Image (spheres, rainbow, N blue to C red):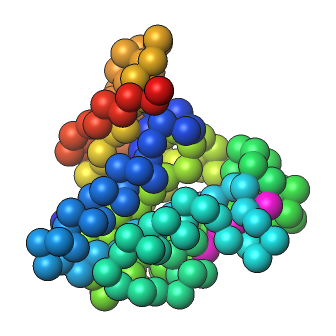
Amino acid sequence: MSYFITGTDTGVGKTLVSCALLHGLAAQGKRVVGFKPVAAGCDDADHNEDARALRAASSIQAAYGQINPYCFPHAIAPHLAARHAGVRIEFGRILASYRELAAQADTVIVEGVGGFCVPLNAQQDSADLAAALGLPVILVVGMRLGCLNHALLTLRAIAAQPLECAGWVANVLD
């Protein structure tokens, strides 16, 4: 079983939770791989810290470009980062990378970018990507003032796709 990891916001611990799942499943003997389809905030080598962490936590060593097909230098909303780079984020490319990884693994942990509804291009957002993948969703909630509202709104958005929320993780941010 593979999962789509999303959060109530950016910086709530999606990578921490994704890596913990990868380590836990690998410890059970599963062939696991992390997948960060879109990342904004990449270094000079066009690599992203979160994608590197997912790759390090994976028991299957796929090529970096397969784990992170879209990596943009500016740490801004992905649709803006893509526009700035002169690129359009295409779901076909993401789905092809996912299928290649899924063929090698028992479990693919797909880490979304930002929150569940962050735009990826002019017509599609992260929720649309989760729906295209058809995976159960795990919601990471950053425990801070206002998080209950953010969590409930995100759960409604997940149900509207309609996707299964397989569970949620309360992550203490301080």
Q: Please say if 125 is above or below 43.
A: above
From the top left corner, tell me how far across and down residue 150 is, in percent.
Answer: 44, 21
From the top left corner, tell me how far across and down residue 166 is, in percent.
Answer: 20, 45
Q: Residue at x 26, y 52 (%)?
A: 136
Does 174 lie within the magenta span? no
- Say whether residue 151 is left or right of residue 120: left
Whether residue 170 is visible to the viewer of this picture, yes or no, is: yes
Whether residue 133 is visible to the viewer of this picture, yes or no, is: no
- Say whether residue 12 is left or right of residue 2: right
Residue found farthest to the top = 145
- Total marks in image: 0
Q: Residue at x 21, y 40 (%)?
A: 167
Residue range in magenta is 69-73
Q: Camera-side residue: 64 or 56?
A: 56
- Say whether residue 103 is left or right of residue 48: left
From the top left corner, tell me how far across and down residue 69 is, in percent.
Answer: 61, 74
**Magenta span main SS:** strand
Q: Residue at x 21, y 63 (%)?
A: 24
Q: Residue at x 87, y 56 (%)?
A: 84
